[in-house]
Structures are given as structure tokens and as C-alpha cells.
Amino acid sequence: FGLLLLFLLVPPHRVYLITAFILYRLFDFLKPYPAKRLEGLPRSWGIMADDIVAALYSYVVIAVLGCFARYFL
């Protein structure tokens, strides 16, 4: 669910989608705060919350990189 959410948020361009996928997998593997904590929620809520946090962190990084890219390209 998290990856789908992320793909809906980023622009539909190949570079954005590849970067989004790589960042999502990285954040999903590292589980930064609060993703690790949310993983402990009951039933499948923890898995969904963990994926959503990874998607949101990935989106923030892509948005910041996009802002910097506008100034340097």
C-alpha cells in the first residue's frame, strides 16, 4: 500500500518513479522513527503504518531533492 501511495504522490516521470522506489525500499528496510514503533501495532495495522511512514519519508526526500534540482539545473 505504501508504494502505491508514493507512486500517486510523485510526478509520473521515469526518474521520479525509480528514485521513489529506491528510497521507499531503503526506508522500509531501515525503519526510521516512528516506523519501527508503528510496526508493533496489532494485526496488520502495523505493517500498513510502517509502509505509509516509509512512503511519506520517501516523498519528503524527493520533494526536497526536487527543490534543490530546480536551482542547480
Image (spheres, rainbow, N blue to C red):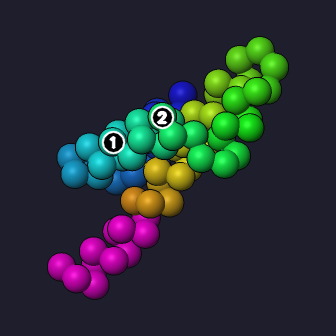
Q: Residues within 10 Å of mark 2 (few under 14, many from 20)?
A: few
Residue at left 57%, top 34%? Answer: 51
Instruction: Give the alpha-carbon distance from disc 2 to disc 1, as whole Å.
Output: 11 Å
Residue at left 67%, top 37%? Answer: 36
Please give the residue where the numbered disc 1 appears in the rendered image: 22
Residue at left 64%, top 24%? Answer: 47
> Horizontal and vertical percent for residue 44?
71, 17
Say if 67 sits above or below 49 in the image: below
Q: Residues within 10 Å of mark 1 (few under 14, many from 20)?
A: few
The three-letter code of the residue at mark 1 reads Ile
Please give the residue where the numbered disc 2 appears in the rendered image: 29
Q: Quadrant of the N terminus?
A: top right
Q: Locate residue 26 relative to residue 49 in the image: left or right.
A: left
Of marks 2 and 1, which one's residue comes earlier in the chain? 1
Q: Quadrant of the C terminus?
A: bottom left
Is label 1 in a helix, a strand or a loop?
helix
Residue at left 42%, top 41%? Answer: 26
Q: Quadrant of residue 72?
A: bottom left
Q: Which residues are magenta?
A: 63-73
Closest to the observer, 36 or 13 = 36
